[in-house]
Image: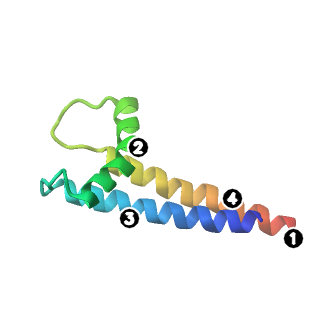
Amino acid sequence: MIEAIAGVLDIVLQIYMWIVIISALISWVNPDPYNPIVRFLRSVTEPAFGWVRRILRLPAVGIDFSPIIVLLAIVFLQQFLVRTLHQIAMNMR
């Protein structure tokens, strides 16, 4: 059961990482805000980006570092949480 949770969590984090990357890349080209894909990407990533912006309160320098910080958090969760769950599952055998 724990092994399955770790696998699903790893897949979900991997998908969200790609969504964050695509959202950051699309933000460079000034996309149409009424495009359904752009609206989906913003609705999925903006809560995480907004939370990071509120926590860090970086001065307005023209560069949004929140996608980078979200990506680092995803990598941390994959490396720490998913691996820990895999190890717990291995120890329970």
Q: Which residue is depicted at the point 30% across and 50% down?
A: 42
Label 3 SS: helix
Q: CA distance from mark 4 to mark 2?
A: 24 Å
Task: Assign a secondary structure to mark 4.
Answer: helix
> Residues under labels 2 and 3: Cα distance?
14 Å
**Which amino acid, by three-letter code, is at mark 2?**
Ala
Q: Which residue matches tag 4?
A: 84
| Res. 1 mark | none
> Considering the image in quadrants, where does the N terminus appear?
bottom right
| Residue occupying image coordinates x 66% and y 64% | 6
- Categorize mark 4 by other alpha carbons within 10 Å: few (<14), some (14-19), many (20+): some
Q: CA distance from mark 4 to mark 3?
A: 23 Å
Which residue, given by chain and number where applicable, does mark 3 sit on?
Answer: 18
Instruction: Say which residue label 1 marks.
Output: 93
Question: Which sits in the foreground, 14 or 62?
Answer: 14
Q: Earlier in the sequence, mark 1 or mark 2?
A: 2
Mark 1 vs mark 2, CA separation in Å: 36 Å
Q: What is the distance, in whole Å, between disc 3 and disc 1 at their CAs? A: 33 Å
Q: Which mark is residue 48?
A: 2
The local secondary structure at tag 1 comes to loop
Lateral position of residue 16 relative to residue 91, left or right: left
Nearer the observer, 47 or 38: 38
Specify the amino acid type for callout 4.
Thr
Q: Position of residue 56 (x, y in %)?
A: 36, 32
Label 2–label 3 contact, CB within 8 A: no
Q: Secondary structure at mark 2?
A: helix
Residue 31 sits in quarter: bottom left
Q: Position of residue 16 (x, y in %)?
A: 44, 59
